[in-house]
Image (spheres, coloured by chain):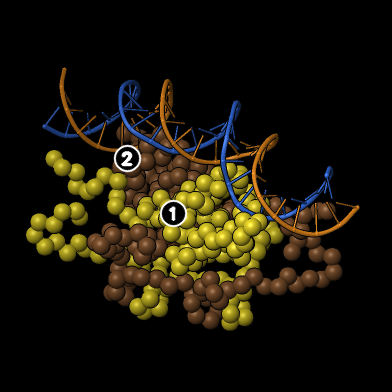
Chain colours: A yellow, B brown, C orange, D blue
Amino acid sequence: MTPKTPEPRVCSVARSLEVVGEKWALLAVREVLLGNRRFDEIVRRTGAPRDTMAARLKTLVEAGVMERRQYSEHPARHEYLLTDAGKDLYPVITTLREWGDRYLSGRQGPPSTFEHSCGHTLTTRLVCESCGEPATFANSRRPKPARAGASLEG
Amino acid sequence: MTPKTPEPRVCSVARSLEVVGEKWALLAVREVLLGNRRFDEIVRRTGAPRDTMAARLKTLVEAGVMERRQYSEHPARHEYLLTDAGKDLYPVITTLREWGDRYLSGRQGPPSTFEHSCGHTLTTRLVCESCGEPATFANSRRPKPARAGASLEG
DNA sequence: AAGGTAGGTCCAGATTTCGGACCTACCGAA
DNA sequence: TTCGGTAGGTCCGAAATCTGGACCTACCTT
């Protein structure tokens, strides 16, 4: 009969990756978060081909993650700024960074560290906004679908 | 002279993306987190080409994110399980999901929700492990490099 | 014997990425 | 005036990846 569930899952993770999942996209965001807004700088510090980065920045701007702003007329110069949506990628980048710190650092330890405003070296934890307790693989689950009659999609 | 900083930044974000940044990699992890461990199921629910997913699972296993285990001899059958490193990608997936929920959901709202063990619908926040306060773009910064004489690298 | 399930592989074509050369415009120094 | 440097790209051909679909093996059930 009809498949029980839409074949490719309708999912915010997939949607997000359509926007920021292309190669170099998140590294571009990382650079701007670190304060580098100029094209050459972004290319240099990510290592991406200029070509690819130009294309990537274009799609990020179109997707509303960054904004391209002219900061100098005459020598026409542009810079890339993060929109609110772009700044909200901070948790994604940070969790990726900490995962790499934990699983991909050699004996030298993490290649870079950050400092929280409280004064400590930053390590983070993901918590439930309602109760403040850690949110983990083990303690979150999908709620039972509140089936009310003929709902499409499970 | 010599460049002030290593050209492509040495960075855990970049390292992480080398492992989980290829197309379909994080969606494969998502599926296993959701409880689908079989190849066909992973292919079906992600929408990836079988070929690509086979290759991706192979690299994830090699990278130590997943483990491929035989759960049936004779009809030789395998399943994919997350290692500890794989389970620790939960925060990455969750922050990506919430970003998509916030910025890419249409008028129908998020395509799926989760429930925390406290009973509430799960929304998360990233906090500093030391002080418990939110960790954001605005309140974390790179510490001053503790320059002691002739340190390479800034 | 037919059909289904599970877990793949193989292939040819389409799409992306890569690195490097090149281009335009401006500035400052010689 | 010419040279060199900076900034922000574009263009190109070659290489690597991704894509969809067909196909394969082994087993089980009907």
- Nearest the viewer among B116 and A53 is A53
- Badge 2: chain ID: B
**x and y, in percent, of residue C3 in the image:** 17, 28
Name the image quarter holding residue A12.
Answer: bottom left
> Do dots 2 and 1 share one subunit?
no
- Nearest the viewer among A38 and B121 is A38
> What kind of residue is marked 2?
Asp
> Which secondary structure lies at badge 1?
helix
Q: Is residue B44 visible?
A: yes
A122 left or right, relative to B146: left
2 and 1 marks in contact (CB < 8 Å): no
> Which secondary structure lies at badge 2?
helix
**x and y, in percent, of residue A126 in the image:** 45, 70
**x and y, in percent, of residue A102 in the image:** 57, 61
Q: Is residue B112 visible?
A: no
**x and y, in percent, of residue B140 in the image:** 58, 74
> What kind of residue is marked 1?
Glu
- Badge 1: chain ID: A
**Viewer-nearest of labels 2 and 1?**
1
Read off the residue under disc 1: A62
The residue at the point 84 percent across, 65 percent down is: B150
The residue at the point 51 percent across, 74 percent down is: B135
B119 left or right, relative to B22: left
The residue at the point 24 percent across, 47 percent down is: A6
Quadrant occupied by the C terminus of chain B: bottom right
Read off the residue under disc 2: B40
- Mark 1 is surrounded, within 10 Å at the Cα level, by few (under 14), some (14 to 19) or many (20 or more) other residues, namely few
B152 left or right, relative to A142: right
